[in-house]
Structure formats: structure tokens, C-alpha cells
Image (tube, rainbow, N blue to C red):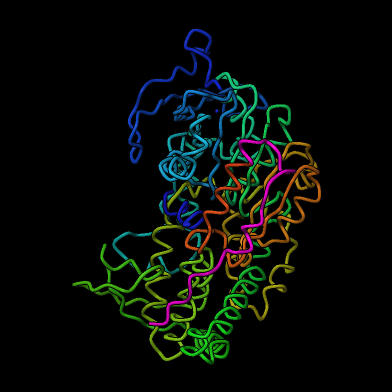
């Protein structure tokens, strides 16, 4: 999704083999891709759904290649793996192409919709009623809808065949079909896990990897979400207290945030929120007028979730003090708008069936009963997400994953790791842990950054480092001195 790309970022001499040598199963053709101004090349590759038996249903994977633009081309492309899991890489193509204009001068950019997403046999579920705003402000995965979606998808899909290890073997098939010997990978959020799994399974075909917001195979989402959110929230509150303008506007911010939580613990608040296309700016910009309103009930869980998602991006995070202050004074409208917007634009999009197939196999089974709930006690976020996701997984098929899957990924390929200082979901500790097993890696913690890095002053420094890393193919000679000059652009106070 472009929205996920905004959360994450808002922030090569020879391409594929010629048509004569490319396998007929992946013949590229000129095509139009929304948001891409020049011609792209599109194709599909058929793979077997059940790779272990090599029998049964075949599914098509959708691929877009943006050819290198310059005269001097490198043979190793850049593959992009998005977050989620469940996002479409191809939907993100315009933003990634804009980000990596310099890289594309020498390298092709390749976008593969992972099996179960986008144009690759998507596992889409309808969990909310678009005409009923309140439906978005309930369960993260409504159980009746989860059961219904499973029944619908199982008519044409084996839901146990959509895990990260299987998808990364698909990606290697695409690499081979396009005629690339080695590739570079850029992955964000869940895409970091996928990139590391590809490194484990196909190390000989990796030139470099760039990962932002590391979600390793042993993170077991959403086990640590409450702790990560609490750390990020307190970090942003501390930055507000150190900022003269913010501290003057909200001198009692820490107490106000606690007061908001205490009020919502008593029960939901009823709020009238504007609805319609003009009323969805609450998370990143001023509220806008609308001709119609809807009465909704905002619970503690959804209010905390809204704050958590705001902390994903530095620009949205800069509005957390203002929205918390207004809620503390009794005005819950901005917070309710924000909660609704994230449920509509983030939770309600993407391939939620794939999200369940992956997390119900790779994450939830390895969280000991009661342990995550205990760790969530006395946090702003609480344990609702873990409880609700565990209930959804109880009615979803569980895939098998390889033995030792959660072990740290090791590899000699150069790996550039980026983490925002106040990332609420993949904190710097994740990057440090991954780097400790990758001898040719470099971990950069971006000051004031979040899960995404866009909107910070001086953030072009990070793009320059990424581009230089791609050119050199090593972390050893990178100059990272500019990182210390990155700053937050201030806080919204009205």
C-alpha cells in the first residue's frame, strides 16, 4: 500500500537476460503502472502452490520491472519487499522508484507481489462494513468475519502454503526466471524478516541487503508491541518536554496521557466524528469540515492503537502531544478520527488472509500463554491485540515452518540496517540483535526517527548513505557522520 509506504519512508551493467534467453514462463511486456511516468515491464510467473509436494494447484505471481535508466548498467537489480505482511510491492512501486532515482540509473528495480498479496493470488478478507464507521472500531480481527473469510478462501487456496520461507523460494524463482545471478534487496518492516529469510535460504544470490525497521524471525509479533509502544510514547513525551514550544503548550503532558488512559479504562466515550473523504486527516493534519457526522464509541483499545500508529511516523508522532492534550480536556474527536482513519487505511487494507497465515504460523504459536498479557500490564497499549490475534489464529489453519526458523539469521553478505530511535514496533534492540549475527553489517539508529523516517530535518542524509552503500556494495567505507545532524521539525501545538 502507498499508505504503508508513507508510514515507513514519509517518510543495475545489464538487466534481465534478453527475450531469447529468458524462460518463456516469464515473458515481460510493456505495461502501464499507476504512478509510474515511464514505461514499465510486467509479467507473471506460475509456481506450484504446494512447493513441498510439487503437486496440485498452480498460482500466478505478478512482477513489475523498471529498467535501469542510464547507459552504464550493473547486472544486479534491486528487489523491494514491503511491510505488512500483506502489502503489495507493486502498489508501492511509484514511491520506491521516486526514492531510488539514483540507484535506478544503474540498476533495474524489481517488484514482486508476494504470494497471497496484490496481483499474486491474493488472500483478501473483508473485515469491516464501509458504511458503518463503528464496525472499524471494534475487534482487530472480528471472529465471525475471520471464519467466513477462511471458508471463502479455502475454496481456491491452501492457506497453509503462504509463509515467508515459501514466499522467499518464490522470489528466488523470479530471480532465476529474469536471469539475474545476484540481487540487492530493500525490505521494510515485515519485509526485513522476508529479506533475512531469503539470505538464509539463498545466500549465494545476495549481493547486498538494506533493511529498515527490523522484524526478525524471533520477534513473535505482537508479543512485544506494548513495551515498544510504551518506550516510543515516553520518548516522544520526553522530547516534547525538552522542546521549549511544546513544553510551554503542554506542561503536564505525562499526567495528561495518564489521565486519558484512566478515563478510557472506565469505559468507551461517545464521540461525533466527521465522515466522508474530507474527514480523514486526523492522523497527520488538521481536522477538516464535513457535511455529515457519525456517532461512534471510542474504546481504550482503539484509542491506544491510534496513538501507537501515530508513533510509526515522525510527522504523525509530532501531533501526539496535541491530541493527548485535547483528549485530556474532554475533546476526543481528533483521537477518534485518528483511530478511524488508521483502521480504514491500514488495518482494513492489504491481504489480511496472508497476514493471518504468516503470523498464525510464525509468531502466535511461540508466545507462551499468559506471558505476553503479563508484560502488557500497566502499559498504555495493553494486551488487547495479543488476545484478539490469538483468538483469530485459533480458527485459522496453522502452517508448518522449518525447524530452527526462529534462530538468528547468519550470513556474510553486506547488510545495512536502519532503525528509528523511537520506533514503536521494531526498536533499535532488534537491529542490534540482527547485526550481531551479520559480520558485514552496519546498524544506524536515526535520531528522532520512528518506524518510518520521513519528515525529519536532514533525512536526505540517510538516502545518500543508502545510495552509496548500493554503489560500493560494502558497509566498511560508508561515511555516516551526517546522521547526527538529523532533527525533528518541532511539534504541533494548535
Magenta-highlighted residues: 469-494
> In terms of depth relative to the viewer, which is nearer, 94 or 262?
94
Residue 135 position by quadrant: bottom left
Q: At which x and y percent is residue 486?
A: 57, 63
Give above or below for 193 relative to 168: below
Q: Is residue 84 magenta?
A: no
Q: Is residue 482 magenta?
A: yes
The one nearer the camera, 140 or 249, is: 249
Q: Residue at x 50, y 59 (%)?
A: 141
The tally of labels here is 0
Lateral position of residue 434 relative to residue 348, left or right: right
Q: Where is residue 147 in the image (x, y as percent from the top left)?
A: 50, 52
Is residue 208 shown above or below 176? below
- Which image quarter is the C terminus in? bottom left
Q: Is the magenta stretch mostly helix, strand or loop?
A: loop
Q: Nearer the viewer, residue 325 or 122?
A: 325
Q: Which residue lies furthest to the top in this view?
A: 20
- Tell which residue pokes out farthest to the left in this image: 291
Amino acid at each position: 500500500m502507498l499508505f504503508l509506504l508513507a508510514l515507513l519512508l514519509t517518510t543495475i551493467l545489464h538487466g534481465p537476460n534478453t527475450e531469447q534467453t529468458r524462460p518463456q514462463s516469464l515473458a515481460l511486456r510493456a505495461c502501464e503502472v499507476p504512478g509510474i511516468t515511464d514505461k514499465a515491464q510486467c509479467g507473471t510467473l506460475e509456481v506450484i502452490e504446494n512447493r513441498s509436494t510439487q503437486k496440485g494447484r498452480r498460482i500466478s505471481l505478478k512482477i513489475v520491472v523498471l529498467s535501469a535508466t542510464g547507459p552504464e548498467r550493473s547486472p544486479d537489480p534491486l528487489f523491494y519487499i514491503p511491510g505488512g505482511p500483506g502489502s503489495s510491492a507493486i502498489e508501492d512501486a511509484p514511491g520506491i522508484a521516486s526514492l531510488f532515482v539514483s540507484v535506478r540509473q544503474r540498476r533495474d528495480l524489481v517488484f514482486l507481489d508476494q504470494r497471497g498479496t496484490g496481483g499474486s493470488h491474493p488472500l483478501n478478507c473483508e473485515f469491516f462494513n464501509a458504511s458503518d464507521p463503528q464496525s472499524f472500531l471494534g475487534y482487530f480481527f472480528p471472529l465471525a468475519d475471520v471464519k467466513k473469510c477462511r471458508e471463502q478462501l479455502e475454496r481456491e487456496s491452501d492457506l497453509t502454503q503462504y509463509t515467508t520461507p515459501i514466499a522467499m523460494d518464490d522470489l528466488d524463482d523470479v530471480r532465476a526466471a529474469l536471469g539475474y545471478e545476484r540481487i540487492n534487496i530493500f525490505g521494510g518492516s515485515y519485509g526485513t524478516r522476508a529479506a533475512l529469510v531469503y539470505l538464509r535460504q539463498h545466500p549465494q544470490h545476495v549481493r547486498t541487503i538494506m533493511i529498515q525497521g527490523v522484524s526478525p524471525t524471533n520477534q513473535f509479533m505482537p508479543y512485544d508491541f506494548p513495551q515498544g509502544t510504551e518506550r516510543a510514547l515516553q520518548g516522544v513525551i520526553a522530547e516534547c518536554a525538552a522542546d521549549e514550544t511544546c513544553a510551554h503548550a503542554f506542561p503536564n503532558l505525562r499526567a495528561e496521557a495518564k489521565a486519558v488512559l484512566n478515563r478510557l479504562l472506565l469505559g468507551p466515550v461517545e464521540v461525533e466524528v466527521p465522515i466522508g473523504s474530507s474527514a480523514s486527516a486526523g492522523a497527520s493534519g488538521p481536522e477538516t469540515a464535513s457535511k455529515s457526522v457519525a456517532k461512534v464509541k471510542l474504546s481504550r483499545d482503539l484509542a491506544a492503537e491510534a496513538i501507537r500508529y501515530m508513533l510509526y511516523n515522525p510527522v504523525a508522532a509530532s501531533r501526539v502531544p496535541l491530541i493527548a492534550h485535547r483528549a485530556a480536556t474532554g475533546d476526543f474527536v481528533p483521537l477518534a478520527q485518528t483511530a478511524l482513519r488508521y483502521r480504514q487505511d491500514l488495518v482494513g487494507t492489504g491481504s489480511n488472509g496472508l497476514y493471518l497465515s504468516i503470523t498464525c504460523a510464525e509468531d502466535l504459536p511461540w508466545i507462551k500463554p499468559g506471558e505476553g498479557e503479563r508484560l502488557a500490564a500497566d502499559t498504555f497499549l495493553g494486551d488487547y491485540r495479543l488476545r484478539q490475534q490469538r483468538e483469530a489464529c485459533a480458527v485459522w489453519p496453522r502452517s508448518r515452518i522449518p525447524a530452527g526458523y526462529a534462530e538468528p539469521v547468519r550470513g556474510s553478505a553486506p547488510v545495512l540496517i536502519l532503525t528509528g530511535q523511537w520506533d514503536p514496533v521494531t526498536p533499535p534492540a532488534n537491529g542490534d540483535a540482527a547485526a550481531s549475527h551479520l559480520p558485514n553489517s552496519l546498524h544506524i539508529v536515526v535520531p528522532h526517527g520512528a518506524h518510518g523516517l520521513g519528515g525529519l530535518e536532514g533525512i536526505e542524509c540517510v538516502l545518500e548513505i543508502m545510495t552509496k552503500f548500493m554503489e560500493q556494495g560494502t558497509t566498511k567505507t560508508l561515511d555516516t557522520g551526517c546522521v547526527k545532524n538529523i532533527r525533528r521539525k518541532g511539534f504541533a501545538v494548535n
